Image (cartoon, helix red, strand yellow):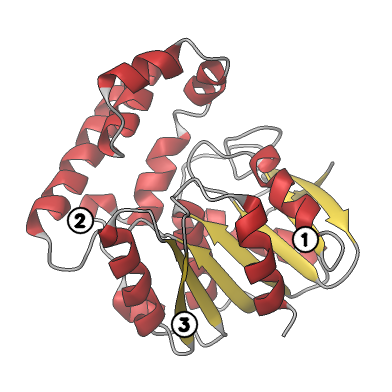
Amino acid sequence: MHKVTSRDGTPIAVERRGDGPPLISVGGAFNDRSAGAPLAELLAARFTVYCYDRRGRGDSGDTQPYAVGREIEDLQAVIADAGGSACVYGMSSGAALALEAAARGSAITRLALFEPPYNPAGDGELMRGAKEYETKLVALLADRRHGEAVELFLTVVGMSQEMIAQVRTAPMWAGMVAMAPTLAYEAAVMGDSEGGCLPAERAAAVAVPTLVLSGGRSPQWMGQVAQQVADAVQHGRHAVLEDQTHDVDPRALAPVLEDFFAR
């Protein structure tokens, strides 16, 4: 592990594996750099894979106030460390962050996204739900009720109360509570305060080849959104990984990414 320094002085922890063209992995909610390690190991024979702790997680710093632009600068610092340009893979809300970085001109050569969880365009009920979630989340975090903030997030993404009770007793719970403040960062990246839909105008600025993936066993709306993202960027393609869900198996994902990034 080594650290790079973002534009605002925030140290960002990075791990590098493999040998070959640079490929940067951007994790989603509750992901630190260790979450990307299994996929990185599978890709390391063809690429130099960079996994990093997004700000507020793991060994990275967390300079305040938060802004999505600062997270983009973090990714740009990792790209600079990788040689000045790189392929980028983003998972879930990390996919939305990677898309924003590409839209703002970051030195991304090829972009792959797995199920960026935007709300389907025009779904008023889901848009209202995103706004209500963001309001409740901010209030809980302001009161330092981090455990309740985690429960709120898990409820919103569809976990039952029984499943949440099991998570609370699992070893992962302490780490999730520690990362709870970053849920506000995810909400900002996803634009939840404005309904959480794809920022189509910004996406239209993405000119690099872009592969948008969804799981064949994921909810239907995730595939619809993936197609919307692929249609919004200038050179996008949507592909479905059969038998996969949002918790995608790295063994199913790696060959698809390898083929796309090696072109």
**Disc 3 crowd, CA 10 A, few/some/many (<14, 14-19, 20+):** some
Element type where label 3 sits in the image: strand
Residue 237 badge: 3
Per the image, label 2 sits on a secondary structure element best described as loop
- Residue 172 in sight: yes
| Residue found 56% across the figure and 22% down from its top | 175
Instruction: Give whichever of discs 1 and 2 has the lower sequence position.
Output: 1
Image side of residue 190 versus residue 122, left or right: right
- Residue type pointed to by label 2: Gly
Which residue is drawn at the image coordinates 68% and 53% (left, top)?
A: 6
Residue 199, given in percent of the width and then of the height, sits at 31, 70
- Give the amino acid type for the residue marked by disc 1 in the picture: Leu
- Compared to residue 29, the image places residue 139 above or below, namely above
Residue 139 or residue 242, whichever sits in front:
242
* Number of callouts: 3
First in sequence, mark 3 or 1: give its number: 1
> Relative to 83, is 238 on the left or the right?
left
Q: Where is residue 35 in the image (x, y as percent from the top left)?
A: 64, 41
- Report which residue position mark 2 lands on: 195
User: What is the C-alpha distance between the residues marked 1 and 2?
Assistant: 35 Å
From the image, tell me which residue sits under label 1. Answer: 43
Which image quadrant: the N terminus? Answer: top right
Given the current orientation, which residue lies at the most extreme top position? 169
